Amino acid sequence: MIGNSGWLMSKNFIFSSESVGEGHPDKVADYISDSVLDACLEQDPHSRVACETLVKSNCVFLAGEITTNAKLNYEEIVRQAIREIGYTNDDDIFHADKVFISNILTAQSSDIAQGVNAAEAAGKDTAEQGAGDQGIMFGYACNQTPELMPAPVMYAHRLLREMAHQRKDVKIPWLRPDVKSQVALEYVDGKAVAIKNVGDLHAARRRRNTCGD
């Protein structure tokens, strides 16, 4: 098989993918921002929300610009999002009811608004609605899984979904939200033939008396 650069690509290889749980700091920040967006849209479907969240230790910082007619209690939105993730244990430093929240959200800049609004404005050739942030995304589908995604990443996702089920529904006491999984598959002639490695999930083990390996 010849790649775009002209070099020969082997059909025999090991492919590894990882997945992080809902309690991973990146996921926590995304979930809080998404919760703010959902709350705005619930009251005002025409809301424009650019909400960034940073989490560290026992602190949450909200920043960005929002245009909405919604009347929101941002602190309660943040705390409820953290509760849903599962940071409610007494030994959690990052705890839904104890985190410090800094909110520096402001109204959308008038400069940005005039470029996005479907209205005449200085510097615009037409009154059509413009675009705000723009990006290019790409990807591909494959037939390795029903989700049409590569098998290693889907298996890593499934591991964490099962861990979330065990933590939330089965109530295994030592599991925590901040977990990570990694799955490596061996491919021969472009087809998966063996599991070479299932990554370490030790971030889930938080209590002192939980076994190690």
Image: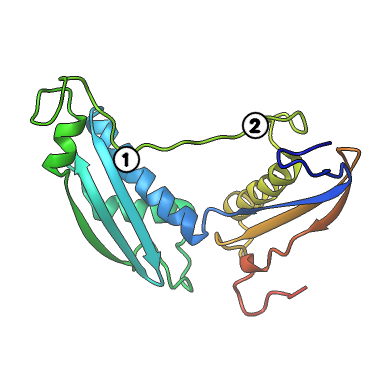
Tell me the quadrant of the picture where the C terminus can be found. Answer: bottom right
- Say which amino acid is labelled 1: Leu
- Please name whichever residue, 211 or 192, is drawn nearer the observer in this view of the structure: 192
Which residue is located at x 67 percent, y 29 percent? 141
**Position of residue 6 in the picture relative to residue 62 (left or right):** right
Crowding at label 1, few (<14), some or many (≥20) Cα neighbours within 10 Å? some
Q: Quadrant of residue 190?
A: top right
Which residue is located at x 28 percent, y 31 percent? 131
Q: Position of residue 140 (x, y in %)?
A: 64, 31
**Position of residue 99 in the picture relative to residue 138 (left or right):** left
Q: Inspect this view and state whether residue 132 appears.
A: yes
Mark in front: 1 vs 2 = 2
**Circle 2 is placed at which residue position?**
140
Q: Position of residue 86 (x, y in %)?
A: 49, 57
Tell me the quadrant of the picture where the N terminus can be found. Answer: top right
Which residue is located at x 18 percent, y 33 percent? 115
- Please name whichever residue, 79 or 135, is drawn nearer the observer in this view of the structure: 135
Q: Do the residues under discs 1 and 2 have CB atoms within 8 angstroms? A: no
- Say which amino acid is labelled 2: Tyr
Q: Secondary structure at mark 2?
A: loop
**Circle 1 is placed at which residue position?**
37
Q: Is residue 44 above or below residue 92?
A: above
Q: Position of residue 127 (x, y in %)?
A: 15, 20
**Position of residue 124 in the picture relative to residue 137 (left or right):** left
